[in-house]
C-alpha cells in the first residue's frame, strides 16, 4: 500500500473512532436518563455507566491500527460482543437483586474498568493489534477485561429468573473463548507476543485456561 | 490465452484496490463500508433497544 493510501486509510479509521466514541458516550448518557429514577443510582447501574463511558472515551483516544483481524475474525468475535447486552435486557431491575449479587457485579465491573484503563490507547473491540500491553492486570491474565465481563455475566444469569437469560450467560463462555482465540491470532504478530505468552500463561481463568 | 492473462491482471488490480488485505479466507470489502455500517448499526440498535451497547 502506498503512503498516500495508508494516510487516507488512517484518516478513515480516526474518523470512525471519533464518531463511534462520541456515539457511545452519547448513548451511555441517554441510557442514564432512560433508567427509572429509583434504579439510576444503584451501584450496578452506576458501574455499567462507568464501563460504557470508559469504552466511549477509549475509542476517542486509541492508537492507530497496527494490524486488523480481517472480516472473518471480526465476525467470529461479534456474538460474544452482543451476549452481554442481550442478557442484561432479561435481568430484573438491579434494585431487586440480592445484595451480594450487586456487590459481586460491581466488583467485577470495577475490575473490568480498571483493566480497560490499563489497556488505555491499545484498546480494541474487534480482533486487532494496537500495541501489546503486558503490565498491571495483564501480568496476571492475558484477557482480564473478559474475565471481569464473564463474572458480570454469571451474576446477571444468577439474578435472572429467565432460563433463556441463563442460557445466554452460560453460552457466552464458549463465545468468549472464540473471540479470545481470534484476537490472539492477530496479537501473535507482535514481536513481544511469544515472551508475553511464556510469562503470562493464563488467558481467562487462572490455572485453567 | 492473452484474455485469460488480462483477466488475472484485472483481478489483481481490483484486489489491490480493496482496503482490507485478504491474509486468510476473509471476504474483501472496502474498509470505509465496514466503518459506516458499524456506525449505522450501533446507533440504530441504540435507538431501537435500550441494550444497543457495544458492551452493556
Image: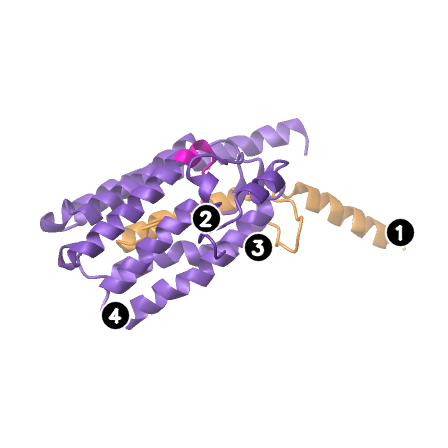
Chain colours: A purple, B orange
Query: In this image, A135 relative to A52: left or right?
Result: right
Identify the chain of the residue marked 4, using the numbered disc in the image.
A
* Most common SS among magenta residues: helix
* Furthest residue toward right: B1
Query: In this image, A185 relative to A84: left or right?
Result: right
Residue B51 location, x and y as percent? Answer: 29, 54
In the displayed structure, A140 sits above or below A167; it is: above
Identify the chain of the residue marked 3, using the numbered disc in the image.
A
Q: Nearer the viewer, mark 3 or mark 4?
A: 4
Residue A185 location, x and y as percent? Answer: 59, 49
Identify the chain of the residue marked 1, using the numbered disc in the image.
B
Q: Which mark is residue A162?
A: 4
Do marks 2 and 1 share a chain? yes
Residue A4 location, x and y as percent? Answer: 63, 27
| SS state under label 4 | loop
Which residue is identified by label 2?
B37
Front residue of A2/A35: it is A35
Can residue B41 be spotted in the picture?
A: no
Q: Earlier in the sequence, mark 2 or mark 1?
A: 1
Which class describes the residues within 10 Å of circle 3: few (<14), some (14-19), or many (20+)? some
Do marks 1 and 4 share a chain? no
Bounds of the magenta span? A118-125
Identify the chain of the residue marked 2, using the numbered disc in the image.
B
Amino acid at each position: 500500500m502506498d503512503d498516500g493510501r495508508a494516510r487516507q486509510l488512517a484518516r478513515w479509521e480516526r474518523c470512525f473512532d471519533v464518531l463511534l466514541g462520541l456515539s457511545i458516550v452519547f448513548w451511555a448518557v441517554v441510557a442514564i436518563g432512560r433508567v427509572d429514577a429509583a434504579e439510576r443510582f444503584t451501584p450496578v447501574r452506576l458501574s455499567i455507566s462507568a464501563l460504557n463511558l470508559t469504552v466511549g472515551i477509549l475509542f476517542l483516544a486509541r492508537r492507530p491500527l497496527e494490524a486488523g483481524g480481517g472480516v472473518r475474525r471480526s465476525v467470529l468475535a461479534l456474538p460474544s460482543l452482543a451476549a452481554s447486552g442481550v442478557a442484561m435486557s432479561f435481568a430484573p431491575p438491579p434494585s431487586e437483586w440480592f445484595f451480594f449479587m450487586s456487590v459481586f457485579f460491581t466488583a467485577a465491573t470495577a475490575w473490568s474498568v480498571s483493566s480497560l484503563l490499563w489497556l488505555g490507547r491499545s484498546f480494541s473491540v474487534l480482533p486487532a493489534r494496537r500495541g501489546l500491553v503486558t503490565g498491571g492486570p495483564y501480568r496476571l491474565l492475558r484477557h482480564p477485561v473478559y474475565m471481569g465481563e464473564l463474572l458480570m455475566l454469571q451474576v446477571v444469569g444468577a439474578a435472572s429468573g429467565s432460563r433463556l437469560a441463563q442460557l445466554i450467560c452460560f453460552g457466552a463462555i464458549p463465545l468468549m473463548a472464540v473471540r479470545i482465540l481470534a484476537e490472539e491470532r492477530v496479537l501473535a504478530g507482535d514481536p513481544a507476543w511469544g515472551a508475553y505468552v511464556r510469562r503470562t500463561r493464563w488467558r481467562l481463568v487462572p490455572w485453567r485456561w | 490465452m492473452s484474455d485469460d492473462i488480462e483477466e488475472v491482471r484485472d483481478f489483481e488490480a481490483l484486489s489491490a484496490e480493496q482496503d482490507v488485505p485478504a491474509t486468510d479466507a476473509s471476504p474483501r470489502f472496502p474498509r470505509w463500508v465496514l466503518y459506516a455500517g458499524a456506525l449505522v448499526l450501533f446507533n440504530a440498535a441504540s435507538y431501537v433497544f435500550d441494550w444497543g451497547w457495544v458492551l452493556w
